[in-house]
Amino acid sequence: MQALWMVLASLFFATMGVCIKFASTHFNSFEIVFYRGLVGVVFLVGLTRVQGVALGTSLPMMHLWRSVVGVTALTSWFYAIAVLPLATAMTLNYMSSVWIAAFLLGGALLVQGRNAPIRQQSPLFLAVLAGFGGVAMMLRPTLGEGQAVGALVGLMSGIFSAFAYLQVAALARAGEPEGRTVFYFSVGAVIAGALGMAFAGASEWHWPSALWLLPIGLLAVFGQLCMTRAYSSGATMVVANLQYSGIVFAALYSLTIFGDQLPLVGWLGMGLIIVSGITATALRARAVPNAPAEEH
C-alpha cells in the first residue's frame, strides 16, 4: 500500500505543479506558499476535527525542523517551477532520493570511520555520482539563457526536500498522526509566506487567475497526506524511490500542456537520474549495514 500512497502523492504534486505554473504569472513564490499553506490549515482543522485527532503535540521541535526545511524546499521549488520548464524543475526537486543516499552514506562513513570498507562503498559512490551526471545531461539541452539561478534554486529544493522526507519518517515513527504532521507544516508555510510577502510585496488579484490558488492548496494537502501515510507505513528509502513517478507525470504534463521539448539526451539524463537513485538506495543496505537510523 505504501507504493500506491507514494505514487498517488506524486500525481497530486505533479498536478499541483501545473497549477503553480499558471499561477506564477500572477503571484510570486511567497504568495503561493502563503495561500497554499492557508488552504491547508483550513482544510486540516476540519479534517482533524472529524477524525478526532488533537492538534496538540509533544514534539514541537521536530515539527519546527520539518517546517523549516520543508518550507525552504517548497519556496525554492515554486521559484524553479516559475522560471524553468516543468519537467526540469520537477526532476531537480525529485533528486531528493539521490541526496538521501548521499547523506546516509556520509553519515555511515563518519560513524564507521576506517572500519568502513572502501571497496564496498565504491558502487554507492558511483551511483550517486551518476545521478549528478544525469542532471548535467538533462539541464544542458533544456537550460535556457538566464535560467542558471533557477537551476541552482531547483537543486537546493531537492536537498531540502531530502531533509524534509527524513523528518516526516521520523515523525511517523514517533507516532504523530498524518493530519497533525501536515497541519504544522501548513502553519509553517503560512508564516514563512507572510514574512516573504512583507519584503517581496503582494500582487493584485486578477479573476479568474486567482482561482488557481484553491486547487494548489487542495492538491498540496492531499499530496502531503498521501506522502506522510506512505512514509508512516513503509521503509523510508523504498518509499523515497517511488517519488520518481512524479518525474514521469511532470514530463507528460510538460509535453502535452506546455509544449516543452525534451531532446533524446534529456530523456537519457532523466532515466539516468531515476536509475541512479534506485541503484543507490538498493546498494545502501548492503554497503552500509551499520548506518545510523534514517530518522537521524
Image: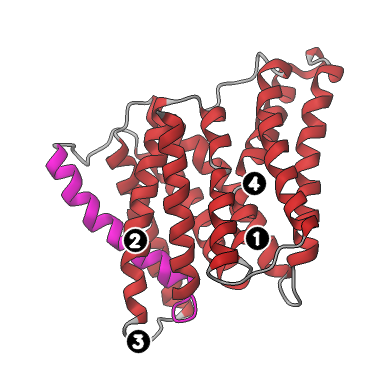
Q: Residues within 10 Å of mark 1 (few under 14, many from 20)?
A: many
Image quarter of the C terminus: top right
> Separation of disc 3 and disc 1 at Cα?
28 Å
Q: Is residue 296 visible?
A: no
Point out residue 121 in the picture as x, y percentages from the top left corner.
Answer: 80, 22
Which residue, given by chain and number where applicable, does mark 2 sit on?
A: 217
Residue type (three-letter) at the residue carrying disc 2 = Gly
Which residue, given by chain and number where applicable, does mark 1 sit on?
A: 88
First along the sequence among labels 4 and 2: 4
Which residue, given by chain and number where applicable, does mark 3 sit on?
A: 206
Left or right, 118 with reference to 110: right
Would residue 48 be counted in the magenta stretch? yes
Q: Main secondary structure of the magenta part?
A: helix
Q: Residues within 10 Å of mark 2 (few under 14, many from 20)?
A: many
First along the sequence among labels 3 and 2: 3
> Separation of disc 3 and disc 4 at Cα?
35 Å
First along the sequence among labels 4 and 1: 1
Q: Residues within 10 Å of mark 4 (few under 14, many from 20)?
A: many
Which residue, given by chain and number where applicable, does mark 4 sit on?
A: 95
Q: Residue at (57%, 29%) from the top-left corner? A: 237
* Colour scheme employed for the rendering of this structure: secondary structure
Left or right, 204 with reference to 20: left
First along the sequence among labels 3 and 4: 4
Residue range corresponding to the magenta coloring: 24-51
